[in-house]
Image: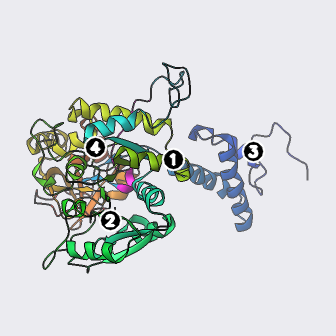
Amino acid sequence: MTRPSESSPGPAPDRPPSVDRLARSLADIGLPHPLLVDAARTAVAEAVAADEPASALIRARELAEATARALLSDVVNATGVLLHTNLGRAPWSPSSGDDRRYTTLEFDLASGSRGSRQDRAPALLARACGAEAAMVVNNCASAVLLVLAALAAGRGVVVSRGEMVEIGGGFRIPNVMAQSGARLVEVGTTNRTRIGDFSAAIAADPDVALTLSVHQSNYRIEGFTESASVAELAALDVPVVADIGSGLLDAACPWLADGPPGWLADEPAARQTLEAGAALVTFSGDKLLGGPQAGIIAGRADLIAACAAHPLARALRPGSLVLQSLQNLALAYLTRDGWAIPFWRMATEPVSDLRARAGRIAANLTPDLVADTVAVPGGGTLPGVEIPSVGLVLAGDRVAELRAGSPPVVARVTDHSTVLDLRTVHPDDDDVIAAALAGLTPDAAPVQATADRTPSSDRR
């Protein structure tokens, strides 16, 4: 048998192509060459094992395309869940400045000496919520961990049994407290904890450092209930730390022209919690605050300084991209420009505007696609809250086809129908929705416009 020459147009029919040649044939996918080599090598190995040499070509492309689609990428969120944890929660894309330049992350321009990364965005956030000072860490669980470690390590922290919450991923308040070195002091019962339970625990244990109030952000207890307010706890002899979770800065929502929407009723806010007497509040940056993933600690300057001086503060600190993002966000709040914050723009868009957008999308398809829907805040905030919305509804489950598009459109299935809720879709992406619907296989008959059930809210 003669060996094929180097100029041969292809491999011998009884062998798969070489890994290198196969990898180079995948260059149009746009991945770095080492990743294409990985796909080619796997495909060749599978082809040899199955004794099907020709399958390597198809299999390598499948593997490379799957790798490309698995990368972090943009999607259109048509689920109706505003703070969708799996889709990155708040849709905030900050301007990080000119990428030719550095930033004054830890540099004082006036003195030319080293500064603190906690001097800028945190100070603006403190101003926005009426706190003496603030600092930023990488998420709200970190904020609680740092506060407990800095202010109560080896000492007692009193918590109601009704506030022993578990947040997404199985992280529980008792576990966070144990890692901090603080000692958990449980009081009350699941449904009823009185202020007297707290005062009795403090009187019985002279080494109590804090009381901790934890917002039940991802569930509700109703019926025969009682709880101690922050104002009541503040009258006791130890500081109150309130984990409000969601990141609502001010219950008055001065950044919205029409004031707070009705669905925000009873949601704790940083400004009002501090005014009620909390020494510190902790909250998330990527929930109702509407920014990047971060944890904010705000309140008394001396307690913030103690947290900043703790060794964990360095381990939990955010980088320049997060701080730049939070600075831009805080400036929008202080300017009272809620329309500049995508979460608030989407959450408060009038239903009439959504219906008009839906009508324009459906105009070249069928008007029967337009339906009333309901959106939810999501992200473990405001459980049970529904926000009236409008979307497009198709018969059957078409979500896999929509996800396969470019860019992918993520929708939801309700009552055997596919719902694309426009409250979570930016108006600039309406053409993407229209193209995605037009590109579906033709067996999707529209259903009549009916009220939609609430989408599943993702966990905290």
Quadrant of the drawing holding the C terminus: bottom left
What residue does disc 3 label? 20
Tell me which label, 1 or 3, sits earlier in the chain.
Answer: 3
What is the spatial separation of the Cα atoms under label 1 and label 3, in whole angstroms?
54 Å
Helix, strand or loop at mark 1: helix
Front of the two marks 1 and 3: 1
Residue ID for mark 2: 211
Q: Residue at x 32, y 65 (%)?
A: 211
Residue bearing the label numbered 1:
309
How many neighbours does mark 1 have within 10 angstroms: few (below 14), some (14-19), or many (20 or more)?
Answer: few
- Viewer-nearest of discs 3 and 4: 4
Magenta highlight range:
85-96
Q: Find residue 459 and report its horizontal and vertical position in percent.
A: 33, 63
**Circles 1 and 2: CB distance less than 8 Å?**
no
- In the image, is residue 180 above or below residue 4? below
Give the main secondary structure, helix, strand or loop, of the magenta stretch: loop
Distance from disc 4 to disc 1, alpha carbons, whole Å, reads: 50 Å
Mark sitting earlier along the chain (4/1)? 1
Q: Which one is in front in this view, the residue at disc 2 or the one at disc 3? A: 2
Distance from Cα at disc 3 to Cα at disc 4: 39 Å
Q: Are marks 4 and 1 in contact (CB under 8 Å)?
A: no
The answer to whether marks 2 and 3 mark residues whose Cβ atoms lie closer than 8 Å is no
Q: Which mark is residue 433?
A: 4
Residue drawn 38% across the image and 52% down it: 87
